[in-house]
Each structure stands twice: as C-alpha cells, then as structure tokens.
Image: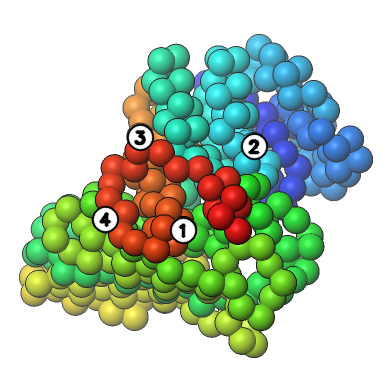
Amino acid sequence: MQPLRVAIIGCGFIAQKHVRSLLEIGEDVELVALCDIDKHRLERFAEDVCRPHYPNLRLYTTIEECMSRNDVDLIAITTSSHTHASLAIAALQAGKHVLVEKPLALSIQDARTAAAEAKHRGLILAVSLQTRYLSQTQAIKKAVDEGRFGSLIHGVVSMRWNRDMDYYYASPWRDSWVTGGGLFMNQCIHYIDLLQWLMGPVVSVFGEAGTFMQPLHIENMGVAVLKFANGATGIVEASSCVYPKSLLTSLSIFGERGSVSLEGVRLNELKHWSFANEQTEDESVFVHTDEISHTPLYEDLIQAIRTGTPPLVSVETSLDSLEVILAIYKSIMEGKSVQLPLDDFDMKNMALKS
C-alpha cells in the first residue's frame, strides 16, 4: 500500500517531534514537503532533522505552493497558535486532510468554521491532543465508559511547572493572548482536555488567574472550577512559575466506586488505582505507562484516512475542550461564572481588557 504522504508547515521546536514520529512509523508514511516562511530556518531544519531520512524532500517558503501539491495527503500545521485556524481552513480548501497542533484556534468561531469546512469537504481535521493515546489514560477512559467509577464525583488536574523567561524569549508568540493564548491555552490544554474527555460535557466554568514574578503579558498561574452535565465537579490548578523548578503534573478521577490518580512529567506514575469491582486486567495498568508521543496519533490518522473512520482526536471531539478553555478566559475577564455552550469568544478580548 502506498505510504501516506505528509507535508509539514512550520519548522519550530514542535515540528521535530512530528518528524521523529514519522520516522518511528517507517514505511507506512513519507515526509514529502516542508514549508516555512523563514528560508534560513527552513533550510536549517531540513538539513539537521529531515534530509538524512528524506533525501527527496521538497522545500517551500510559500504556503500556497506547498498546499497545491497533488502528492500530499496530509498537512501537519506546526506554526504559532494564532495561525492554526486560517492555515487549517486553507489546507482543507486545497483538498488535504489536516493535523493541526494544539490549539486549533484562539476563538471559538474560528474553530467552528474550520470544523464546518472539514465536514463540508468530507476531510479529516485532527488536533494534536496526544495525551489521549497514553495507555494509562486509555485505561481510565475504558473504566469510565464501563461504569466502573459509578457516578463521577470530581476530577482534578494539577500542572505545577516552571518556565523561565528564556522559554518566552525563544518564542515571543508565547507571551501574548493574541498569538499564543496564555497558560491555560498553551500549556495546560492537554490536561484540561483529558479532564473533559474523561468526565463528559461541561455546563459552566469559573476561573481566576494572575501574573507573578515574571514580566509577562499573559497569566502564569490560574485555577478553574468546572461543572459537568453529570453533576460532577472539575478542578484545574495550573502554574508555570513554581519555585525553583517544575514539580508535578497530575490527573485524578474520583467516583462513588472507584478512584484513580496519575502523576509524573508524562503522567507516567500510577499513584492510585482502586475499584469496588477489581479485575485481573487491572494489573496491566501498573506496567504500561507510555511517554507522550505523536506516534500513536499518526498511526490513528493513517488508519482513519484509509478507512474513512474518525480518529480519536477528530475536530468533533476536540471542540469541547477548546470551548472550556475559552470559557475559562471569558470568566477571568468578566469575573463571573460562564455558561456553556459559548456563544462567541476570542482571545483578542483578553488583550483588549489588558
């Protein structure tokens, strides 16, 4: 079977992880094109990361020219956050399946427009929310779907990180609500997504945030309380200014008949797994704790494109967590609880407020 042919737009840090995953998959996929508006960055990335493995790789500094290639099946968008939605829509209009780095958009309307474009054209639009593919989070999802928790009571995500100013200087778009989105959108999105994915639809959000210790234009500490349609409560604690270094990341789910807690940089430490109806296969959860990787995401996308089935991170399943994050920002801005679904909200509103 012909390999899936991929073009990557954007040659920043995250693009390296995409190339690494394509190489891990091997003959089932091929990187055929690379695009970046910065010619020097493009050429350096191609030579350092790609050329040894993909000698026939074509380079483009014009996005339209890259998208017009007939031999591209999937376009991966790895640019700065504020360009994601417009590039995704352009790629869909060029007839390509699309994988876009998180977040899909910095406004709910742009995200819904991209989703509608994919549906209209019968193409796959997926978002890089790769923590869903971890075997340990898959095991929790299976337990939820099987009803082993009973009624869900509450869930907690905690992200206690340290990011110094060099992190922001390296990519200045991170220090802007207009281009990067802030702590909840740029760093904590994976963990908020897991909480929503595991516990179901959110009906209301209340958030608070602030900026401490660093000369930033975005929040670097915040909390949020989520109310779920099933009556459960979600708690989000996020920081990128923990002194003196990053501590833990954790995810915990509590129900009337079960409790689970993961910790670790990659949620790879299983701290607690307890259910009233213990099962023999539960032992496997303590063994298979994976690293966060784009590889299973690409494997799922290849299967989805070839069979016409939606991937685990399809835009239809990704819009909910993006809406929750935008609602958190709206709550921070307005100082009150926000009900979902969200009529409209754009991260530019945060910049105007500041």
Instruction: State how far apart marks 4 and 2 are (Cα).
Output: 28 Å
Q: Is residue 183 above or below residue 165?
A: above
> Along the polypeptide, which appears first: circle 1 or circle 2?
2
Secondary structure under tag 4 reads strand
> Along the polypeptide, which appears first: circle 3 or circle 1?
3
Name the mark on residue 83. 2
Residue 276, percent from left and from top: 8, 74
Give the number of the mark in front: 1 or 2.
Answer: 1
Marks 3 and 1 in Cβ contact (< 8 Å): no
> Along the polypeptide, which appears first: circle 3 or circle 2?
2
**Residue sticking out furthest to the bottom:** 244
Three-letter amino acid code of the residue under disc 2: Thr
Instruction: State how far apart marks 1 and 4 are (Cα).
Output: 15 Å
Question: Which residue is at a point 21% across and 57% down the rendered structure image?
Answer: 228
Residue 297, percent from left and from top: 48, 44
> Along the polypeptide, which appears first: circle 4 or circle 2?
2
Which residue corresponds to mark 3?
316
Marks 1 and 4 in Cβ contact (< 8 Å): no
Which residue corresponds to mark 4?
204
